[in-house]
Amino acid sequence: MMNKLFSTSLISAAAILLSACSSTPERPNWLDGADVNYPANVYLTASGQAQTASVADNRALANLAKIFEVSIADESIDFSEASISQSNASGSTIRQVDNKQTLSRFVNTQAQQVLQGVSIAERWQDPVTGQQSSLAVMKRAPAAALFMQSIRAADDQTSAAVKYAEQQAPNPLIALSSLESARQRQITRLNDNNNLRVVTGNDINVEYSVETLTQMIKIRLAALSFTTSATDEQALLSLQGAASEVGVQLKDNSQYKLVLTLDKGAVEQRQAWYWLRGNIVLHVMDGNNSISNKRWPFKISAQSEQLLEQRLAAKLTMKLPAYVYQILTPEVK
């Protein structure tokens, strides 16, 4: 899905930036690969064919976009590998949906910047079949410069974030937030580094890798302890399970408290279905002060009213680990 978004963004950006191109009367060499007019050490090239010039242009641009296919995976932390005191951590993977969407927007922005140097350099129409061919070209040097600039910016931001987390953060959650922000920035750096390798054959070494930052986050989580409270006993068990899965300790005398509130609406019946809507609300308390809070809407349906609570409990089991992680790494505005 993200690769599709990336290619679409590339095509949209380049369509606006096409330069004037010439029509070549004889079959050009670029249709067969190498062309002395576009040496491989200077240009990245791709061709496309179709029955119309506009479609051929778009296919050429799409083929050029494939050279920079996004290498960002769903980078998520598996907390089962963390060094934690709990023995009942389940090892499920935390899916950070909000962060992934942010990454997608960032990558598309980078794609548009890279494509500022792309043009349709030539077109050719086969005199026998009438098929149109287009050649998309991009100079390597400007693309490499952009990737290197982004990589250096990511490394500067990451170093500053780590320093802030270690020396200046006013509380553990702000420190975790800073490290998580650095981790996400390094995930996008991975993509830039891979693309730089495509353009130049080389990449830039990293000081704080995604793996290093992930381990730093796990260690800090394992050092945290919380008391817990929730709307009811079942919700409390779900919260405690989620907290253990993330890797924090549960202690009765902790300075910090995790509070789960289920803000439920009235049960509604529509035809043969019952619906329950509301919000899952989490707070992190330091004494009487809430230092982090967030809410997530939920919507549950079932064909009997008795099943609604069971399905809500199942949703809590599935969603709460990610929600707890988000509340412990709050976005700093």
Image (cartoon, rainbow, N blue to C red):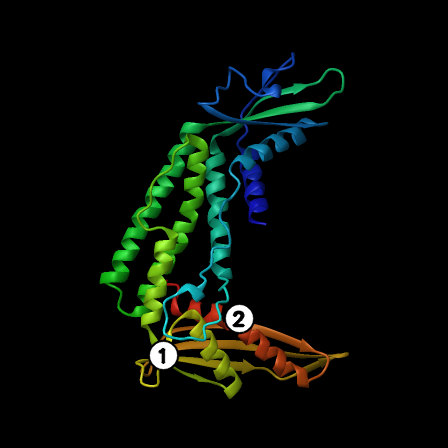
Q: Amino acid at mark 1?
A: Phe
Q: Nearer the viewer, residue 14 or 138?
A: 138
- Residue 18 in percent (x, y) is at 55, 29
Report the front residue among 191 and 49. 191
What SS does tag 2 mark? helix
Q: Is residue 199 above or below residue 2?
A: above
Residue for badge 1 = 226
Residue drawn at x 40%, y 33% as measured from the top left: 144
- In this picture, residue 313 sits left or right of residue 326: right
Q: Amino acid at mark 2?
A: Lys
Residue name at image x 35 percent, y 47 percent:
154
Kindly identify which residue carries mark 2. 319
Q: Residues within 10 Å of mark 1 (few under 14, many from 20)?
A: many
Q: Which mark is residue 205?
A: none
Name the spot of residue 84 as percent of width and height, x first: 37, 71
| Label 2, residues with CA under 10 Å away: few <14, some 14-19, many ≥20 | some
